[in-house]
């Protein structure tokens, strides 16, 4: 017998969970650098345009799939494919993506938890930049320590998911997303006082034609796609917990706007610190775990400042990790009729086990020859496969399904509900049928190295 469907308490609960999901670690360590290195203000404008023509249309489509079917990713496609033409396989792309991401995401988030402890103890307060870098190298190469933090983060995430939609996911999303915003705003006002704030703001906002290329537009397309938690089955699942009481179009706009605000604030927190000490900007783990800790130690109130930042880092990771477990668990619940507790524990254990090689990736404790054979360690390999292939292909098929396969009347019914923007339905459907699939194909071609589109204007090798 089918279990009663859980629902959000209201639109605020949904928004807190959806915004928390969309604000991932990439907002902290990739977005600021990508904007600055690809033309600053020009890239930011391109990103905003791409968010409107690619990101939001897919987001709306996924929420429509979820709310109209009241089922998770696999079941949603099955529900809208009564002729059983195999479209439910598209739902499995999202399930697979979420499972794989969680397996290594928890390792990186675990490093952030370790840095909270290091910040509280003042560990790197008097260390040189080389010593701080060495400390991170030791941490990432210590497979047993990474495994411990990987386990703790997975345990916390799973514990929240198994308590349910309202008592677990929504309750903690409300708490952590609010704290995340508060911490970010406090850090932003602190960074306003730094001498490098002007340079940091210029790096992000100043239009730089020399760095803006055709590939920058494609990078903006990819960023718009990945900063809304689309292509992972998350928004389909979250949409399935929505009651028919709010406009999907308006909610999608609020989510996208919130992500933009957080992304810009994060950039205005990170790079003023970097430019205050006249260091070159960078991205990735090196920025978060090596450069920033050393710089925080040189600023007034360093212990509080660094503790707040890494708390922000962990909360950002946790609000986006919860739906990764939830997507896999809720599909198992529906397909195998398991209880939420059993499904969540099963998924938590599975992601922890599959993430063990990622915890030992830097040390080579598991699969020691992996990097030599595949050119990158296990963690980076899984990340690349998911980001280049699984998520974009899943997003491409989702756009095709909602645009071409799903009944137009059902899609329109959900789109127009509760909004004065019903006149945009034909335009949304046009974008979903033609523009979105084409842009995703371009992203896949560029990111996979099949072709460098800078060659079209003579800018690439």
Image (cartoon, grey):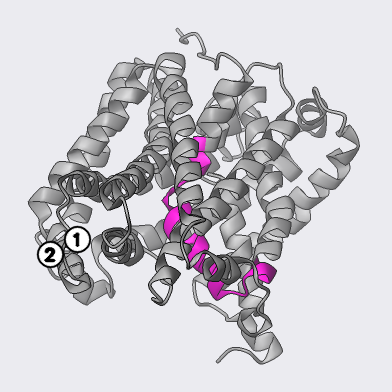
Query: In the depicted view, which residue is nearer to us: 310 or 12?
Result: 310
Residue 88 horizontal side relative to residue 213, left or right:
left
Q: Which x, y percent locates residue 109?
A: 29, 46
Residue at x 22% of width, y 48% of height: 119
Q: Which x, y percent locates residue 430?
A: 82, 50
Residue at x 87% of width, y 33% of height: 422
Magenta stretch bounds: 20-43
Label 1 Cα neighbours within 10 Å, binned few <14 / some 14-19 / many ≥20: many
Residue occupied by mark 1: 361
Q: Is there any visible trace of residue 390 in the rendered image?
A: no
**Residue 37 part of the magenta segment:** yes
Label 2 Cα neighbours within 10 Å, binned few <14 / some 14-19 / many ≥20: some
Give the Cα distance between marks 2 and 1: 5 Å
Q: Which x, y percent locates residue 78?
A: 58, 30
Residue 179 horizontal side relative to residue 38, left or right:
left
- Residue 209 numbered mark, or none: none
For mark 2, give the secondary structure.
loop
Task: In the rendered view, tell whether residue 204 sits above or below residue 146.
Answer: below
Q: Quadrant of the N terminus?
A: top left
User: How many numbered marks, from 0 up?
Assistant: 2
Residue at x 25% of width, y 37% of height: 153
Residue occupied by mark 2: 364
Q: Do the CB atoms of the residues marked 2 and 1 lie less than 8 Å apart?
A: yes
Q: Which x, y percent locates residue 184?
A: 47, 44
């Amino acid at each position: 017998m089918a279990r009663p469907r859980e629902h959000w308490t209201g639109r605020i609960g949904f928004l807190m969970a959806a915004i928390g999901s969309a604000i991932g670690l990439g907002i902290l360590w990739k977005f600021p650098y990508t904007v600055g290195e690809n033309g600053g203000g020009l890239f930011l404008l391109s990103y905003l345009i791409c968010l409107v023509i690619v990101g939001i249309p897919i987001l709306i489509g996924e929420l429509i799939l979820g709310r109209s079917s009241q089922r998770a990713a696999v079941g949603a496609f099955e529900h809208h494919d009564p002729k059983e033409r195999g479209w439910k396989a598209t739902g499995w792309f999202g399930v697979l993506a979420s499972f794989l991401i969680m397996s290594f995401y928890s390792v990186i988030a675990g490093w952030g938890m370790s840095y909270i402890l290091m910040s509280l103890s003042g560990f790197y307060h008097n260390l040189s930049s080389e010593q701080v870098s060495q400390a991170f190298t030791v941490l990432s190469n210590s497979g047993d320590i990474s495994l411990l933090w990987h386990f703790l983060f997975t345990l916390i995430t799973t514990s929240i998911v198994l308590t349910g939609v309202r008592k677990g996911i929504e309750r903690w999303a409300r708490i952590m997303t609010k704290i995340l915003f508060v911490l970010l705003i406090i850090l932003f006002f602190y960074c306003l006082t730094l001498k490098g704030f002007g340079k940091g703001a210029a790096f992000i906002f100043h239009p730089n034609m020399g760095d803006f290329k055709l590939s920058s537009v494609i990078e903006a397309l990819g960023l718009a796609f990945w900063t809304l938690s689309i292509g992972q089955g998350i928004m389909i699942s979250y949409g399935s917990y929505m009651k028919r009481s709010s406009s999907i179009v308006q909610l999608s706009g609020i989510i996208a706007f919130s992500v933009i605000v957080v992304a810009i604030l994060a950039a205005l927190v990170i790079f003023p610190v970097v430019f205050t000490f006249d260091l070159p900007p960078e991205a990735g783990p090196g920025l978060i775990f090596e450069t920033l800790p050393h710089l925080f130690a040189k600023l007034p109130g360093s212990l509080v400042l660094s503790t707040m930042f890494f708390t922000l880092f962990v909360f950002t990771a946790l609000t986006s990790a919860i739906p990764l477990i939830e997507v896999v668990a809720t599909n198992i619940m529906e397909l195998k009729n398991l209880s939420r507790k059993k499904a969540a524990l099963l998924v938590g254990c599975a992601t922890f086990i599959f993430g063990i090689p990622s915890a030992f990736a830097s040390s080579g404790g598991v699969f020691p020859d992996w990097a030599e054979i595949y050119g990158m360690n296990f963690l980076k390999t899984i990340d690349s496969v998911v980001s280049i292939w699984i998520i974009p292909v899943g997003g491409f098929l989702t756009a095709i399904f909602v645009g071409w396969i799903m009944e137009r009347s059902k899609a329109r019914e959900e789109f127009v509900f509760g909004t004065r923007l019903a006149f945009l339905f034909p335009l949304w459907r046009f974008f979903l049928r033609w523009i979105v699939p084409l842009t995703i194909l371009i992203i896949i071609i560029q990111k996979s190295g099949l072709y460098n589109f800078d060659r079209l204007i003579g800018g690439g090798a």
